[in-house]
Amino acid sequence: MGLRLLPFPCRTLGRRQIDPHLEAAVSDFTQVSVLVAFVDLSRFAAHTEDTDDVAVAAIVDAYYELIDATVRAAGGRVVKFIGDAGLVVFPAEAVDAGVLALFELKQSVDQFMAERDWPCRLMVKAHFGPVAAGSFGARDDKRYDVLGKTVNTTARLDSTGVALSADAFRQLSPETRKRFKKHTPPIAYIRLEDQRPAKRGRR
């Protein structure tokens, strides 16, 4: 079942069009399969503890803009930001482009932070599956969001760079799959250049 939409025209930004399925939905909720990704920065809390809040805000705002531009150029959408973290989605037909955009984002954010002498580096984790999508929030301030088991599974993935669940990996083209290696348990796929996450107990 596709996402019911308000009559938004398809906009163009960068290399690709934004998929209309990721535009604002009406207030009822529908189920749609998407690539869900969480991004956040390592060492952010520790590094900003002794940094002026206004200076931090300026860096974080530029970081948000970089994420949004990269995600939109690949046909995706930033659902929301909170602190140093962001939740983004890509439509089912753009999973390959979305994963390549996440690779690009990892490189560009890491470079952005290094140029400012920040030790923070981008951590990315992504999963593919159905979500409940629609407009959530206060009666007079509803905003597009996604929730459900797919979002929860994404949040629980471990990453030292860019990590995909097995379900997300299966959506990739053979060529893009070559840029990952298997990590177990549980089964996940990480970039060839990333270290394997340390084992943790169930969260």
Image (cartoon, helix red, strand yellow):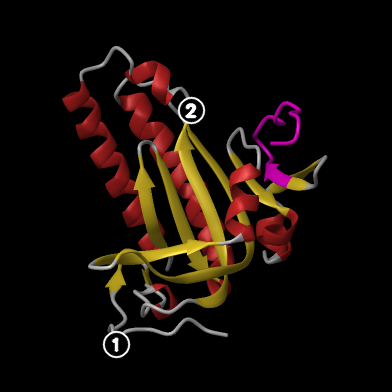
Q: Residue furthest left?
A: 54
**Does residue 32 appear to the left or right of 181 in the view shown?**
left
Mark 1 Cα shell of 10 Å, populated few (<14), some (14-19), many (≥20): few
Amino acid carrying label 2: it is: Ser
Q: Residue furthest front?
A: 139
Q: Residue furthest top?
A: 50
* Residue 131 place in picture, x, y as percent: 57, 67
Q: Which residue sits at x=29%, y=12%? A: 50
Q: Which residue sits at x=31%, y=45%? A: 64
Do we see residue 14 in this rendering?
no
Q: For the residues marked 2 and 1, what is the alpha-carbon distance in whole angstroms?
A: 39 Å
User: Do labels 2 and 1 touch, CB within 8 Å?
Assistant: no
Q: Which residue sits at x=46%, y=22%? A: 43
Element on which disc 1 rests: loop
Do we see residue 100 in this rendering?
yes
The residue singled out by tag 2 in the image is 42
- What stretch of residues is rendered in magenta? 189-203
The one of 158 and 134 positioned closer to us in this rendering: 134
- Magenta-drawn stretch contains 198: yes
Measured along the vertical axis of the image, is residue 167 above or below residue 132? above
Q: Give residue 89's mark.
A: none
* Residue 57 place in picture, x, y as percent: 22, 32
The residue singled out by tag 1 in the image is 7
Amino acid carrying label 1: it is: Pro
Quarter of image, res 169: bottom right
* Residue 141 place in picture, x, y as percent: 25, 64
Q: Which residue sits at x=66%, y=50%? A: 164
